[in-house]
Amino acid sequence: MVLATQPALFDPYTNARRWIDDYRAHVASGGDVLCGGDETPWLAMFEELATLVGDDLAYARERVQRHAADIGTGFRVTGENEERPWPLSPVPLLIEGDEWAAIERGIVQRADLFETILADLYGEAKLVARGLVPAALVAGSPFFLRPLVGLPPPGGHQLHFMAVDLGRGPTGEWRVLADHLRTPSGAGYALENRLAVSRTLGGLQARLNVARHAPFFAAFRDGLAASCNRTDPRIGLLTPGNYTVSYPEQAHLARYLGLLLVEGADLAALEDKVYVRTIGGLKRIDALWRRLDARFLDPLAFDTHSQIGVPGLIDAYAAGNVVLANAPGVGVLEAPAWHAFLPQLCLRLTGASLSLPNIATWWCGQPSECARVEEDLDNLLIAPAFGGGTLGLPTDSAVAGNDLDAAQRTALRADLARRPQDYVGQEIVRLSTMPVVAGDTLVSRPFTLRVFAARGADGRWVVLPGGFARIAEHPDPRAAVMGEGIWSADVVVHGNTPVDPVSLLPPTDTQHIRRNPGTLPSRVADNFFWLGRYLERGEALLAVIRVMLGNSIDADGGAALSSDTIGRLAGLIGSTGAAPRPSSHKRADLTQMARHAMESVGQGWQSVAEINLHARRIGNNSRDRLSADMVRLLDAPFPTHRGTLDRAGSLQRRYAAIAGLSAEHMSRTAAWRFHDLGRRIERALAMVRALLTFGLAGSSLDDLSTLLDLADSQISYRQRYLTGLARVPVVDLVALDTGNPRSLAFQVERIWEHLCALPVLNDDGMAEEQQQQATELKAIVSSARAGTLDGKMLSELEARLIGLSNEIARRYFLQGAEPLRAGGLTLA
C-alpha cells in the first residue's frame, strides 16, 4: 500500500528567514537599518507578517491599506479637492530602546532650547542685543509677530507641541532636517499607522515589548488642561476647515483626545473671553490646540483679510483667558537660517552641545558665509532662509546647486547680490534605507523620521515613542531629492522590558458612566441638519425621475402614464431646479431631462449629482462625528451603469443604506436630532408638493398612482383598499395617516418631538418661537380632513414648513454676530 505524501507544515520562520536573506542580497551598500544592526527583532516582525500572509508580501500591503481605510485615514494634496487613501507600508521601522532614548534626549533638549529662545525673542530680546542672533534673522521672518512682543503666554509656555524631522545617515547617526512649531502635523497619522499595523501584526506588541502611543497623547491632553485657569476646562482643536490637506488627521485626533473640533466661525470673543457657539448658547473655551496659521487667527491683530479667524481672540489671549498651543509667533524658529546659529546658542544657553545636531547650514546674510556658499555651490543645497519663495530659485523649496542650469545659476547669483539674507546653503544629506514592499518582494528605500514632543501636566516634555517614517519612491538617498516621500510606515520602539497596556480608553472595570455626549457647536448642528435635507432631497428627486421614466417600483406593470401626468412629473422636476423642462413628452426628451436632472454638475442646476456633492462636503466636514462607513458611502463615486434607470436605482439603494446607518447606528444625540429634523422637513415639503401636483380634486387615476409611488405607499394602499384607487383614501394615507412613515403627518409629528427635546435658552417655561410654530403646524395637520385638504391649505403648509426651517436656522445655527446680541444666552 502506498501512503499519500503529507504536505509540509507551513513555517512562518522559514518565510521570514528567506525574506531577510533575499533583502540582504538586494541591499548593495551599507546604511540600511536592517543590514547594519541586530536582525533578531526584524526576524520576529517578518515572522508575524508571514503568519498572516504566508509568502504573499503584496497581500500584506493590501491588507494594511485596507485597515487604514477602515480607520478612515486619508489626506489631500495641496490644490486637489479629492481625498487620497493614506499610503501605509506593512513593514514598520524598528528602533531599539537604547537608540531611541538618545533620540528622546535630543528632542527634549531641543524643545527646551526653543522655549528659552522664544521667551527671549518675545521678551527682553537679549540675544539680539548681545549680537548672538542677527536682528535680520528675527525681523526678516514673516512668522515673527511684533504685536506679541512683551506679551507673556497664558500658562507660561510658548510651546506645547512640536515635531522634528530626522534623517539617519549611512553610519547610523541621526541629524535634524527640519523643525515644525507653528502647526505641527502628523501625530494623528502616527496614531492611525499604529492602529492599522497593530491590526495586521497583532502579536508584535508582546514579542517585541513595543512602546505604546497612548501615554504620550494622555500627557499632552493633561498638559493643556493644566495650563488653563479653570479646573475642568473645555479644550478645542482649531482647524482651518475640511479643505486643509490634513483635515482627516485633525478630525481623528479630536475624536481620539475628546476635543471639540472647531473652526473660527464656531468661536466668539466677548469681554476678553472665548466662547464656542452651541445649540445651548455660548460655552466657554479655555484652550485651543490650533492648526490654523497664526497670521489668520485674529483679523483685528494680524491679517485684516482673514475670514477664518476669531476677532478679539488675541485680546482674550493677552488677558490670560485662553491658552493657544502653540503660542502665535513660534514659527519664527522654523526658518532654516536658524540652523546656522542653534549649535552656538545651545552651547551658550545650556552649556552643552546639541545632542541631535542640525545639518550643516550657512546663512547668506553674513558676508563670509555667503561667499562660501557661492564658492561651493555645486556641493550644497540652496534653500530659502525663511521658508518662503525667493526670486533666485526655480521653486519654493530647496534645490541642489549642481541641478541648476546656467540661466538658473545666473538668476540665483543676481538675487544673492541683492538679498543675500533670503538664502541659506546646506550640506546635502544622504539617508539610510529601510525595507519596503514593492510588488511581491522587499526593496530598500531612503526614509526620514518625524518625531513628536508634547508638554505634560508637570511642564516637562514627553516624546512620542516612534512617530512615523516617510519613505521615498526611488532609491536616491539624498534627502533633498526625497521630498515628502510617497509611503509612510509605523515606527516601533522595542526593548526587553514588558510594556503596560496603557490606553486612553477607560478600563473594562470602570464604574464611571457618562450619557451626556458633550457640547454640540452650532456649525455641526447646521451641517447635520442640511446633511439630512440634502440626502432626503436627492432621494425624492430620484423617485420622481424613476416614476417619470415608467419604472414604478411597487405598482404592477401596465400601460404608460398619461401625457398629463408625465407633464406634471416633468414640471415637478423643473420646479426643483434640477433640469430644464423638456420640449416634448417623447421618451427621448424625457430621458434627456432625467439624465440632466441626475448628472449635471457645475451648470447651476440642483441635480442629484450636485446634491451628492453638497452632502459629501458636509460629511467630510463632520467626519469627527460620523462613522467611517457613513463617510465612505457619502464619498462613493457616482454610479456608472449604462442605463439611466439603473444608475437611479443604484443611487436609491445607496441613499437607503445611508438612511439605515442613520436610523440604526447613530446615537440619539442632539446631532442625530438635527440630522433627522432636516430629513423630516425635507420629506414633508416633498409630500406637500406631491399632493399639490397629484392629489387635488380632479386628479386622474394615473395622478393618484404616481402620488402613491412618490410616497412609497403603493403596497400600504392596496392592503387596505381592494376596490381600486380613490382620491380621498389616497390623500388620507399620504397626508394624514400618522402610522405611515412617509406621510406628511408622520413628518410633522417627528419635527414637533425633536424641537420639544432640543435645548431652550430661557428658563421661564414658555415655548420658543420654533417650538410654537411646530405646535401650530401639528395642530393644523392633525385636525385636517382628507376630503377638505385643498390647494390653499397645502400651500399654507408649505409656507409654514419653509418658515419653520428658517426659524430653526435663526435660533440654533446662530449665524453671524447674532448670538452676541440675543437675549437669554448664558455664558458657561
Image: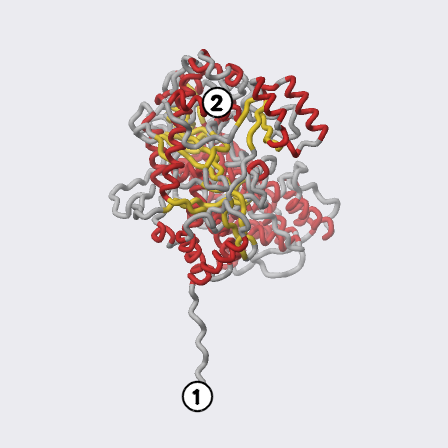
* Residue 58: x %, y % from top left: 53, 56
Query: In the displayed structure, would residue 214 be above or below residue 703?
Result: above
Query: In the displayed structure, would residue 458 be above or below residue 207?
Result: above
Q: Residues under labels 1 and 2: Cα distance?
A: 84 Å
* 813 or 276: nearer the viewer: 276
Query: In the displayed structure, would residue 670 be above or below residue 11?
Result: above
Residue 341 shows which numbered tag? 2
Q: Would residue 499 be found to the left or right of residue 296 on screen?
A: left
Residue of label 1: 1
Q: Residues within 10 Å of mark 1 (few under 14, many from 20)?
A: few
Residue plotted at (73% across, 51% down): 588
* Residue 659: x %, y % from top left: 49, 48
* Residue 308: x %, y % from top left: 52, 26
Q: Is residue 438 visible?
A: yes
Q: Secondary structure at mark 1?
A: loop
Could you tell me if the residues under marks 1 and 2 are in contact, i.e. CB atoms within 8 Å?
A: no
Q: Residues within 10 Å of mark 2 (few under 14, many from 20)?
A: some
Query: In the displayed structure, would residue 87 be above or below residue 758?
Result: below
First-in-chain label (1 vs 2) = 1
Amino acid type of the residue that numbered disc 2 sits on in the rendered structure: Phe
